Amino acid sequence: MPTVRDRVATAAARGAATAIKATGSGRGSTLPGKVANLISASFLRERAAELPEGFVLVTGTNGKTTTAAMAAHILRAQGRSLVHNVEGANLLSGIASAFAAQGRASLGLLEADEAIVPRAVAALGTPRVVVLTNLFRDQLDRYGEVDRLAEGWLDALRRLEGTVLIANADDPLVAQVARSSGLETLYFGLQPGETAASVPDREVSDAVVCPACGELLVYRTRWLSQIGDYGCEHCDFGRPERGLEAHDLLLSSARVTCVVHSSSPQEERCQLSLAVPGMHSVYNALGACGLVGRLGVPLPAALAGLSTYRPVFGRASSYDYRGATVRVSLVKNPAGMNQTLRTLAALRGDRALVFVLNDNIADGRDISWIWDADLESLLPPARTVVACGRREAGMALRLKYAGVGEERLLSTARLEDGLTLALERGHREIDVLPTYTALEEVRVTLAAERRAG
């Protein structure tokens, strides 16, 4: 039974959300939760305790929003009611906003920023399942090196009892956290075969040395940053056996198909057809399938649910804009930028690329990460490349050094102006790559065009 303080916190949060939306000030995904947590320090724990099926956490550097959205899509198709911070507001305030807004539900499906996992566990209690997607260098001025995040994860997980991990076996940093946690773990991963050429040695990797003993880590092949098939010649650390594995991948510009093999709890082989491009989408799908499997959804039903999944805003989503197709793909760190560019390189036809680089607090003030992205090798063919955002000049400079000539390179602060420049050059296929806070400008710009139409 909620306390009086918790009821007041809920009412105040809902009032704040109503005011925000009524005044057009935002989507009410953060501030209402700040109000609730300020009024009641136990708000999150009390609300989590009310969930009949408990709650699960999805965390990691990249892919957590999509993984959680995929899991929510599957679970809702099974008739499960959820508290889900669907907007991707994944700090404690965003989680509290979701609890305040969404009322009663059977299960909490909560996305948590990788840096707040210890605080989330302390505030919410013990999760039934935790999905660990990956650990990449991201916003060094806010989070520090990935080793610090891994230590925070491990400290929080070691305090839990009964929690099950769904962990990416192909990321050595994640694998080391999982195996050191003492918790039951289902590992997932890929055997991409010839569909994934090994990345060049110069491509950024956040796991050069063995996380167990500190000696040089040996990669048989890498297909994204430190993601790949690895092992250590000086200790027993190596890529774990996968209980959930995708192979026979077929990648196209709009979708991916593969065979998913499960060896736990029973041997199964099923086809996955996903209307979202890119190898990283398969990782997200495997994490979601592993999660819902621990919640009682059989693998065939999970994959059937994913066949009708469509991407959330900013994650390989497409929109009409003044007669052009605009694709929006969030990029916020070197590994994510590299994978997005690799995916876009598979697309055919004349196109424009629009980079929107911000340095707000939620993006990280330090934009030096753009120099770690391998634009020299991975930048897709494009007749026009536009730099936008608060740091348009820095983005334009990076593109110039990547080999984009003056005849192709344009620069303007406002996204709307950047899209207009692309349209004036006759482009009808435009790929927009925004950083985190730039997503809101993209959303507003596209929404304004839809209203005008």
Image (cartoon, helix red, strand yellow):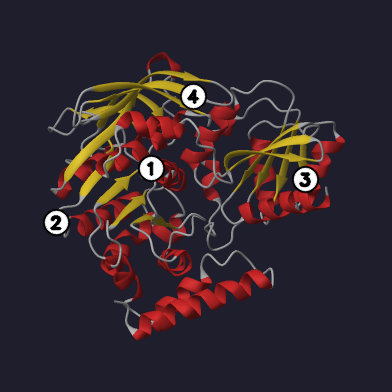
Q: Secondary structure at mark 3?
A: helix
Kind of residue at badge 2: Glu
Label drawn at residue 78: 1
Q: Residues within 10 Å of mark 1 (few under 14, many from 20)?
A: few
Residue 177 seen anywhere in this rendered image of the structure: no
The residue identified by callout 4 is 256
Instruction: Please report whichever mark, 4 or 1, sits nearer to the chain's N-terminal start.
Output: 1
Rendered position, 395 above or below 381: below
Instruction: Please report whichever mark, 4 or 2, sits nearer to the chain's N-terminal start.
Output: 2
For the residues bearing labels 2 and 1, Cβ distance under 8 angstroms: no
Residue extending farthest to the bottom is 4
Residue 351 locus on image (x, y percent): 73, 29
Kind of residue at badge 4: Val
Q: Judge depth for marks 2 and 1 and give the one in front.
A: 1
Label drawn at residue 418: 3
Rounded to the nearest whole Å, what is the CA distance between mark 4 and mark 2?
37 Å
Q: Secondary structure at mark 4?
A: strand
Instruction: Please report whichever mark, 4 or 3, sits nearer to the chain's N-terminal start.
Output: 4
Q: Quadrant of residue 429?
A: top right
Instruction: Please report whichever mark, 2 or 3, sits nearer to the chain's N-terminal start.
Output: 2
Q: Judge depth for marks 1 and 3 and give the one in front.
A: 1
Rounded to the nearest whole Å, what is the CA distance between mark 2 and mark 1?
28 Å
Kind of residue at badge 1: Gln
The residue identified by callout 2 is 161
Instruction: Please report whichever mark, 1 or 3, sits nearer to the chain's N-terminal start.
Output: 1
Rounded to the nearest whole Å, what is the CA distance between mark 1 and mark 3?
43 Å
Question: Which residue appears at 45% of the width and 70% of the height?
Answer: 100
Rounded to the nearest whole Å, what is the CA distance between mark 4 and mark 1?
24 Å
Kind of residue at badge 3: Gly
Figure quadrant of the N terminus: bottom left
Residue 244 locus on image (x, y percent): 27, 30
Question: Which residue appears at 40% of the width and 35% of the height?
Answer: 285
